[in-house]
Amino acid sequence: MRMLFLGAGGVGGYFGGRLVEAGADVTFLVRPARAERLRRDGLRILSPLGDAQLPVKTVTADALAPQYDLVVLAPKAWDLDQAIAALAPAVGAQTYVLPLLNGIAHMDVLDRRFGRERVLGGIAHISAVLDADGTVRHLNELHRLIAGGRDAQAARAAAGFIAQCGSARFDAVLSADIETSLWEKWVFLATLAGMTTLARGSIGEIVQTRDGERLIRRLHAECAAVAAAAGVVIAPQVHARTLAVLTQQGSATAASMLRDLQSGGRTEHEHVLGDMLSRADRFGHDAPVLLAACCHLRVQAARRTPRST
C-alpha cells in the first residue's frame, strides 16, 4: 500500500514515522523548507515508548501525482479547506482518504469533495507536538489509531490499512462501526476540552473542587444526549470508561485545546464545541455547560482577532 501523509506534524509525523520505521511505503507531502530539513536530518521522534530518527520520502505540492492508495490528513479543523486543496492532485480514482480530525463535520466536507465511498473514518488518540526544530515529540504513552469504513468496500480498505499498521509501534484498531466510534471520541473530547478550557486546569484540578466532578458529569450528559438524539447508540460501558477518565482524582489530563488557548493560539472550539452546541439546539436540548464553555472560547477567539473599526 502506497501512502501519502499530508504534513509531518505531531499526529501525521508520529504515525507516519512509525509506519516508515516498520517498513511501510510512506511519503510525506510537505512544504519545500520542511522537505529540505527532512532530507538533511531525517524525521526525529522523541517518545516515552521509543525514540527514532528516520530517513523519509517527501514530495512537494508541485510534484504530486495520483499514485497513492491512501492519503492520510490530520490538519487543524480551520486548515481543512487548504488541506483538501493541497492533497487533491494526489487522489486518483482508486485512492482512499483517511482524515484524523476531531468531531464529525469534516466527514461531510470530504464526502462532497471526494465521494463518500472514498472517505474512511479515522481517530487518533495521541498527544504529540512538533517542536521548533522539527522534532515530533510524543507526550505520553497513548498512541492509538482507529480506522473504519462506512460501506463494505471502504471497510476492506480500512482493514488493509490496519493490517499494514500491524508491525508499527502504535496501537492500530479496526472499527466495525466507525461512525459510532467517531461520536464516542467526540463526546469524550467535547467534555474534556469544554471543561479544561472553561476551568483553565487539568481534570485532577477540576475534580478536587467541590463542584468540579458534578460539572464534568453534566457536560458529558449534555454531549451524550446530542449523540443519542442523532441516533447514535453509545454503549453504557463506553460512557462508564469515559467518565472514569474524566473524573480521575489527581489526573494531569487536559485537552490540547487548553494548551492552544494558554499559548494564545487558535483553537478548534467551533469544530469540537460549536458544532456540538448547534446540534443540541437543533434537537431542542438544553445544554448550559456546553453553552458556557463554547461562549468562553468564542470570547477568547474574538480577543485574538479584534474587529476593525
Image: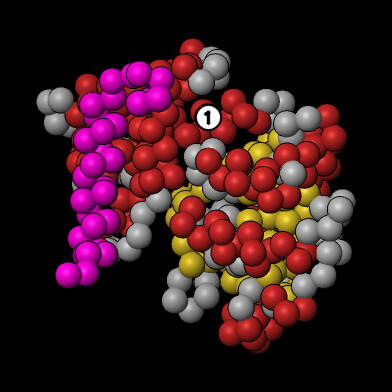
What is the total number of numbered labels drawn onto the structure image? 1
Q: Quadrant of residue 57?
A: bottom right
Note whether residue 106 is visible. Answer: yes
User: Residue at position x 28%, y 40% from top?
Assistant: 294
Q: Position of residue 194 (x, y in %)?
A: 31, 38
User: Residue at position x 64%, y 64% from top?
Assistant: 85
Q: Position of residue 90 (x, y in %)?
A: 77, 64
Q: Nearer the viewer, residue 110 or 254?
A: 110
Q: Position of residue 74 (x, y in %)?
A: 58, 55
Secondary structure at badge 1 equals helix
Instruction: Give the class, few, some or many, for how many residues have Cα within 10 Å of label 1's Cα (few <14, many ≥20).
Output: many
User: Residue at position x 47%, y 17% from top?
Assistant: 229
* 1 left or right of 98 in image: right
Q: Nearer the viewer, residue 105 or 237?
A: 105
Q: Main secondary structure of the magenta part?
A: helix
| Image vertical order of residue 225 relative to residue 270, above or below | above
User: Residue at position x 40%, y 25% from top?
Assistant: 282
The residue range painted magenta reads: 280-309
Quadrant assignment for the C terminus: bottom left
* Residue of label 1: 183
Q: What amino acid does circle 1 point to?
A: Trp
